[in-house]
Image (cartoon, coloured by chain):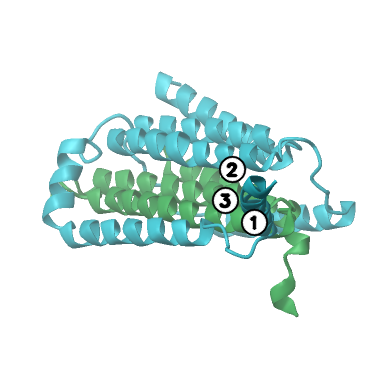
Chain colours: A green, B cyan
Amino acid sequence: MDIKYYIFLSIALFVMGIVGVLTRRNAIIIFMCVELMLNAVNLLLVAFSKMHYAANAAANANAGSEAQLFVFFIMVVAAAEVSVGLAIIVMLFRNTHSVDVNFLNRLKH
Amino acid sequence: MGITEILFWGLSGLALFSALMVITSKNPVFSVLWLIVTFFTISGHYILLNAQFLAVVNIIVYAGAIMVLFLFVIMLMNLSKDTEPQKSKWLKLAGAVAGGCLLLVLVAALRNTESRMTELGTGEIGLIQNLGHVLFTDYVVPFEIASILFLSAMIGAVVIGKREMHSPVHNEVEKIEAMQEEMNISEPVA
């Protein structure tokens, strides 16, 4: 499969995440769109790792495995990020009884 | 057109459709469920690329742990009803146009890339034996640092999520306890 299709699929998923962040007001859905963007990048990294393997498999049997480990570490960081981020959202909801990001502009003042 | 091409296009279409449903669903619970569908299609792509370890980790970590956490928080806050205030129509249109412009620029910039093939269904690098070997020889230090990251994230989540001592609920509880104490003291007298 041509690498172009993977690039375009990842771009489309990433842009959908961006549109979600820009158009929604619920903090949890904005957070989910960030996860969607992370997954689009992961998919592109795995596709590139297989492309690198296809080109360099004769010289190095492990070619491209670094990219897949990178994806693994991205998942690790995403899991830690989600736990802290959801704790912050729960605390905001407890204080303001809303997860509407338009009300959460107190740092501006 | 072989079976892998058919699977690729099917999974791609399903991924794009479910991502679109994530950002257009009114109900946050439906958004979470469509995002789980998206993660499963991405896992399908990983299996097509023979990255079996990442496919399994994606299902376990994302669809299993993270999305359950999201669902749990939504249920906890009782946000599942359609009470989310919507942005105005023009702001939504502006967001969609901005995203479309980004899509246009990126696709136009990458349209003429050199045509290289990725291998589908072959190659050993995605298997857990190979990845585990690389992870525990070349990448041991980042792996151990990840455990410290998890520990600090856990402590941070507990500290942030802890109930504050001066919340109204706490004051009410204190008042009720004081009243109960008073009643207990006054009872023998009466």
Label 2 resides on the chain identified as B
- Determine the image quadrant of residue A18: bottom right
Furthest residue toward right:
B89
Q: Which residue is mark 2?
A: B73
**Residue lying at 21% horizontally and 58% vertically, measured from the top left:** B144
Q: Which residue is mark 3?
A: A14
Q: Nearer the viewer, residue A95 or A21?
A: A95
The percent coordinates of residue A77 (x first, y second) are 39, 56
Q: Are marks 3 and 1 on the same chain?
A: no
**Mark sitting on residue B157:** none
User: Is the N terminus of chain A in the top left, top right, bottom left or bottom right quadrant?
Assistant: top left
Q: Are marks 2 and 1 in contact (CB under 8 Å)?
A: no
Q: Amino acid at mark 1?
A: Ala
Q: Which residue is mark 1?
A: B178
Give the CA distance from mark 3 to mark 1: 56 Å
Q: Are marks 3 and 1 in contact (CB under 8 Å)?
A: no
**Residue lying at 48% horizontally and 46% vertically, measured from the top left:** A39
Tag nearer the camera, 2 or 3:
2
Q: Amino acid at mark 2?
A: Val
Give the CA distance from mark 2 to mark 3: 24 Å
Q: Are marks 2 and 3 in contact (CB under 8 Å)?
A: no
Label 3 resides on the chain identified as A
Q: Quick one: SS at disc 2?
A: helix
Can you say whether A71 is above or below B75 in the image? below
Q: Amino acid at mark 3?
A: Phe
* Horizontal relation, residue A45 to residue B74: left or right: left
